[in-house]
Image: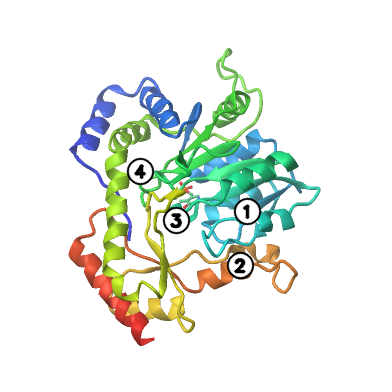
Amino acid sequence: MAGPSITQHELNKVSQMMQDGWDSYQYVEEFEERFAKYNSRKYCLMTPCCTHAIHLALLGLNIKENDEIIVPECTWTGSVAPITYLNAKPVFADISKENWCLEPSNILKNITSKTKGIICVNLYGRMPNYDEILDICSKKNLFLIEDAAESLGSTYKGIISGSFGTCSVHSFHRTKTLTTGEGGALLTDDYKLFERCKFLRDHGRSDKIPYFTLEATPKYMPSNLMGALACAQLDRVEELVNLKRNIRDLYIENFNEIKNEISIIKDDQNHTNGCWATTLIVNKDKFKTKEALDFFKSKDLPLRPFFYPLTSMPGYQKYSKKGQEFENKNAKYISSRGITLPSHYKITKEQIQIIASALTSFIKNN
Ligand SMILES: *Cc1c(COP(=O)(O)O)cnc(C)c1O
């Protein structure tokens, strides 16, 4: 399904770190400086994973018990779980049928006097209408965290993902476009927020007096080993994103026969997609993802479902709005007919053809 692209370049860099990198955070600092530039941001903090970066951002933004944060109904749990660490409340808004991300009108419906901000996810590398969302944030005085974990290399109106809102987060999990095994980053242009999060990231300790704790905080420091691998992967970032885009393009070519039955990530005037994992929706009435996946399992083809609506699962059921006025119907519709295709760097043209032709005949016959 997914996995890294590791070359001699990464091996050399990590081996160099193993020999000379134990006395400092030299590689982490180099990566942070270069990754901020790549994302058109002023500041970057590397973290042990993206989920920690979100937790750190919420701590830095001073989120407290009972504060409400608007999140999309469909995303990976890592986008939302950190809200619950603080006993704050995730408020699940429906997603757009067009771009699978938060929709401005659904954000507005869910704003209350307790709303502090929004976590907006660029799902499968797609990006929402940020012009309108940023406008809502400034009018209602809300923060915006852009979850760019799946959108490395995506752009909206020519502006790179990772540069929108109060701060942005990335993931370098082993399945992501750029990887350090586990890893993440927090990006911002706000110097005060950056300094606060940097302090919170390292046990709230004094930078003047050794071993002197000013505040009891978590510890979310990355290792220099991660930093070295991150630097080497960042050297290849254009190549990596192009490889991912080629996979998407090959799938599209091979889906020609069923192109009217599916919606798949394409680029247009306002959007380019980094294509972390090529995903499609089948628009045919009778189609059900679950039936398709059962069928492909019997053929040993590793397709994956779309993310489930979070409130449909036990972990988030208590936040469900089922039967209520703003029930999240688009999320349910999209999730029940979405499929993520294998997007491993090592996938071959022939394997893509096999998967595409199997899915084509399933869709035509069902
Ligand atoms: C992968 C992912 C995360 C979490 O990343 P980790 O590095 O595993 O913590 C968060 N949000 C989204 C949208 C993701 O896809």
Disc on res. 314: 2
Identify which amino acid the numbered label 4 is placed on.
Leu
Residue hosting label 4: 178
In the image, residue 280 above or below residue 141: below
- Quarter of the image with the C terminus is bottom left
Label 3, residues with CA under 10 Å away: few <14, some 14-19, many ≥20: many
**Marks 4 and 2, how far apart in space?**
31 Å
Residue hosting label 3: 124
Q: Are marks 3 and 2 in contact (CB under 8 Å)?
A: no
Q: Are marks 1 and 4 in contact (CB under 8 Å)?
A: no
Label 2, residues with CA under 10 Å away: few <14, some 14-19, many ≥20: few
Residue at the (57%, 36%) spot, across then down:
167
**Marks 4 and 3, how far apart in space?**
15 Å
- Quarter of the image with the N terminus is bottom left
Disc on res. 71: 1
Residue at the (69%, 39%) spot, across then down:
138
10 displayed left or right of 225? left
Q: Looking at the image, is mark 1 or mark 4 earlier in the sequence?
A: 1
Q: Looking at the image, is mark 4 or mark 2 earlier in the sequence?
A: 4
Q: Is residue 49 visible?
A: no
Numbered-mark total? 4
Mark 3 or 2: the one toward you: 3
Identify which amino acid the numbered label 2 is placed on.
Pro
Identify which amino acid the numbered label 1 is placed on.
Val
Residue at the (65%, 51%) spot, across then down:
84
User: Tag 4, which secondary structure?
Assistant: loop
In the image, residue 6 above or below residue 342: above
Q: Is residue 284 visible?
A: yes
Q: Are marks 4 and 2 in contact (CB under 8 Å)?
A: no
